[in-house]
Structures are given as structure tokens and as C-alpha cells.
Image (spheres, rainbow, N blue to C red):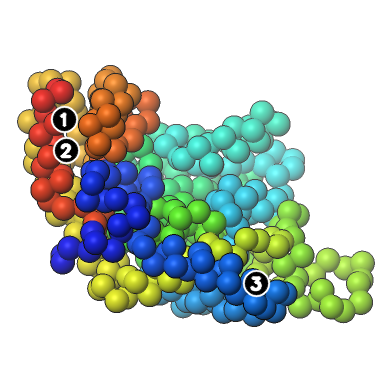
């Protein structure tokens, strides 16, 4: 891939080594220009700025659906996936012995909220995600008439492992009329994940990681034919009726079924501009995936020799992981701290040190980081 680091000067990607691509990717400089434009539009157009904002929202919808190969899904947005998860959960009948199925490797957004529901007496099946090869079978074994939804990740946040057989859940859950919710935050634009064969799935994701958009553009994709109606929703869930006479009946707009309320539009300015930047520089999902496999493979080739020093790669095949390499070590926090002092930014979760490259990180920088890590080991 041709070097694009010069387009990320504000994030100083050539002055420090940012291996945090799985957590917080750098934003291209054009994102700053987009933020300024958002202010200028608000100053010039006042309330009429929303016509421009909704054009950008529609553009983001089109681009997300293209990445997901989604032909006819609906999209609702929020500042976080947690807010969208709550809206989704509020659409379920969680009374009279309701049960939910998930894994023990979900990100804190899902984990914390489901633990809270569990404390209220709702049965949560925490299926062990390992081994991932047989995960679908073990999830389906938990299904019963009380199951209200299945919530899983396309890529697990702590290990980077791709849930390769996730599509095996699609047909059985559709037949049982049980919603499937997929967290794609660590998969979107980093793997080959798409919705072909998963057209009935609900999808949670956002632009903070591999889409380089920063905060604020999180989405819930839903099948348009769903019969679910959220208890928690905002006035934008029925935008069309705002100017009409109120009625006692609560209605929903099909194209924004899980909509919220007034939002900060700046993030959508960034998102639209970053999508344009990706097009201009050929950063298609396919090209980004190819680049990531090369970069994570470079890391894994070195890491496989560190086992005798207590550093254990969770997976050695770059094709089986998303956008980062997970290294199990009791020294994760210490290594993270020392490397950061040396201008090498990593990230850790419990006993896992995570190294996440990105398209603006060069092979030379990766080698420099690995040399320093090897010295510490």
C-alpha cells in the first residue's frame, strides 16, 4: 500500500508509533477540515443546517450498507453502541422467564448491560467462546421457547479472533423467530464480514475504530420487516409526525425505527469527509484487509518466538484474526506503560497486550516497535 502517513499530520503518525488501530485509529487531516465546516454551516444556516446534516447522514448510511453488502436494511444512529443496545433490548419482551444468549467474550457494552439484567432475574446464558470453531453449535444448544435474543461479536475484542462460523446461526434463529444481534465494531473495515446470508440480523457498530471517523457515528442496522418496537426511543423515531397533530397512538418511522433525539452533527461531517478520503486513496475494505493481514502477519512472525519468555500469541494465523494481535502476558500493563514512554502506543486488557497496526503505520515502524518489545521481553 502506498504511504498515506503524510495525510495524518495532526495525529503525528510519523513522530510516534501508533499501534492502537483496534482501539482508536488516527483521523486523517481532512476530518479537521470537516469539523470546521460543521461550525461554518451552523453559523450561516442556523436551523436550516439540518438539511445539510441529513444529507451527510444518508451518505453515511449508503456507505455502511455498501461495506456490509446490505441491500435493504434500516439504520438508526446514536453517539454510542450502548445507547443503541438499550433501545434494542427495550423492544424485547423480557418478562415471564425471558432468557438471552451471549458469549463470555463480549465487549463491556454488552457484558455490563446484560449483567445488570441478570441481577433483575433475567436468565443470561454466558456461552464460552472457546473454542470458536464450535461456538455456533453450543449457542444453538441453548435455544428454547424462552429465548428472546442472541447477542454475539463478529470479532472478539480481547483475542482478535474472528467468529468465522457466525452465519451458521442465521437459518436456525430465523426459523425460531429469535433476533440475532451482531457486534461488528472490531470487524467493520478490518475483516471480510458482510451481511450476505445474515439479512435478518441486527448489527451494532461504529466509526471510532477502523473507519477512522472518531466518536459519535454508531449505528444499529435492523431488518426492515422486523416486528420489534422499542420502548426507549426518541422523537426522531417518528420524525414525520412531529409537525402533525398528536395522537395517543405511538407510531414509528420504518426507516428510523430505533431513532433517538437531537444529536451533535459534527461527527457526520467527519464521517462523510473520511469516506471521501478513503475513496481518493483506494482504501477499500478489501485493500485494508489485505494490508492488515500483512501487518499482523509481520507481528506474528516475530511473536511466535517469544513463548519461552512468557509472551503467548493467542492466534498465529493472520487470516483468523481481525485488525490486531493479542499477546497473553502477566506483564501486559507494565509493557504497555514502558512502551508508551518510548513513543510506542499499544493497549491492554487484563493479561492481554494488544498491538493494532493501521494503514498509516509503516513496516519500519512495526519493526522498531517489535525490536523494543523484544528487548523488554
Q: With 131 as the anchor, is 272 left or right in this view?
A: right
The residue to which callout 3 is attached is 43
Residue 214 visible in the shown view: yes
Give the crowd class for mark 1: few <14, some 14-19, many >=20 residues within 10 Å: some
- Whether pointer 2 and pointer 1 mark residues with C-beta atoms closer than 8 Å, the reply is yes
Question: Which picture quadrant has residue 285?
Answer: bottom left
Residue 237: x %, y % from top left: 72, 67
Q: Nearer the viewer, residue 172 or 37?
A: 37
- Whether pointer 1 and pointer 3 mark residues with C-beta atoms closer than 8 Å, the reply is no
The residue to which callout 2 is attached is 369
The residue to which callout 1 is attached is 373
Residue 64: x %, y % from top left: 45, 69
Residue 43: x %, y % from top left: 65, 72
First in sequence: mark 1 vs mark 3: 3
The residue at 12%/40% (across/down) is: 368
First in sequence: mark 3 vs mark 2: 3
Quarter that holds the N terminus: bottom left
Q: CA distance from mark 3 to mark 2?
A: 45 Å
Give the crowd class for mark 2: few <14, some 14-19, many >=20 residues within 10 Å: many
Q: Is residue 169 above or below residue 352?
A: below
Q: Nearer the viewer, residue 319 or 354?
A: 354
Give the crowd class for mark 3: few <14, some 14-19, many >=20 residues within 10 Å: few
Q: CA distance from mark 1 to mark 3?
A: 49 Å
Question: Which picture quadrant has residue 38?
Answer: bottom right
Q: Nearer the viewer, residue 326 or 148?
A: 326
Residue 342: x %, y % from top left: 23, 31
The residue at 22%/51% (across/down) is: 14
Amino acid at each position: 500500500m502506498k504511504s498515506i502517513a503524510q495525510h495524518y499530520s495532526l495525529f503525528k503518525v510519523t513522530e510516534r508509533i501508533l499501534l492502537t488501530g483496534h482501539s482508536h485509529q488516527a483521523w486523517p487531516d481532512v476530518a479537521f477540515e470537516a469539523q470546521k465546516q460543521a461550525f461554518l454551516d451552523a453559523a450561516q444556516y442556523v436551523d436550516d443546517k439540518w438539511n445539510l446534516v441529513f444529507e451527510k447522514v444518508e451518505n453515511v448510511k449508503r456507505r455502511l450498507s455498501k461495506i456490509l453488502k446490505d441491500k435493504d436494511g434500516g439504520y438508526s444512529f446514536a453517539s454510542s453502541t450502548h445507547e443503541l443496545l438499550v433501545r434494542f433490548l427495550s423492544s424485547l419482551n423480557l418478562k415471564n422467564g425471558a432468557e438471552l444468549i451471549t458469549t463470555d467474550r463480549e465487549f463491556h457494552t454488552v457484558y455490563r448491560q446484560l449483567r445488570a439484567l441478570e441481577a433483575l432475574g433475567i436468565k443470561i446464558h454466558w456461552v464460552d467462546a472457546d473454542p470458536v470453531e464450535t461456538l455456533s453449535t453450543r449457542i444453538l444448544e441453548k435455544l428454547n421457547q424462552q429465548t428472546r435474543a442472541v447477542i454475539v461479536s463478529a470479532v472478539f475484542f480481547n483475542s482478535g479472533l474472528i467468529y468465522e462460523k457466525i452465519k451458521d446461526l442465521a437459518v436456525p434463529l430465523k426459523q425460531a423467530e429469535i433476533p440475532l444481534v451482531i457486534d461488528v465494531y472490531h470487524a467493520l473495515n478490518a475483516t471480510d464480514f458482510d451481511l450476505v446470508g445474515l439479512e435478518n440480523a441486527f448489527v451494532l457498530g461504529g466509526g471510532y475504530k477502523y473507519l477512522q471517523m472518531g466518536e459519535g457515528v454508531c449505528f444499529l442496522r435492523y431488518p426492515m420487516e422486523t416486528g420489534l418496537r422499542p420502548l426507549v426511543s426518541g422523537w426522531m423515531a417518528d420524525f414525520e409526525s412531529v409537525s402533525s397533530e398528536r395522537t395517543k397512538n405511538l407510531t414509528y418511522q420504518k426507516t428510523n425505527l430505533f431513532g433517538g433525539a437531537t444529536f451533535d452533527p459534527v461527527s457526520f461531517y467527519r464521517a462523510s469527509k473520511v469516506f471521501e478520503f478513503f475513496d481518493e486513496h483506494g482504501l477499500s475494505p478489501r485493500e485494508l484487509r489485505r494490508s492488515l493481514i500483512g501487518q499482523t502477519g509481520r507481528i506474528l512472525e516475530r511473536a511466535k518466538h517469544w513463548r519461552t519468555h512468557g509472551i503467548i500469541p493467542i492466534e498465529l494465523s493472520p487470516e483468523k484474526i481481525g485488525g490486531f494481535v493479542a499477546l497473553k502476558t502477566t506483564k501486559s500493563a507494565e509493557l504497555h506503560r514502558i512502551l508508551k514512554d518510548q513513543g510506542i502506543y499499544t493497549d491492554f486488557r487484563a493479561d492481554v497486550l494488544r498491538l493494532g497496526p493501521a494503514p498509516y503505520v509503516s513496516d519500519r515502524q512495526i519493526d522498531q516497535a517489535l525490536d523494543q518489545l523484544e528487548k523488554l521481553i
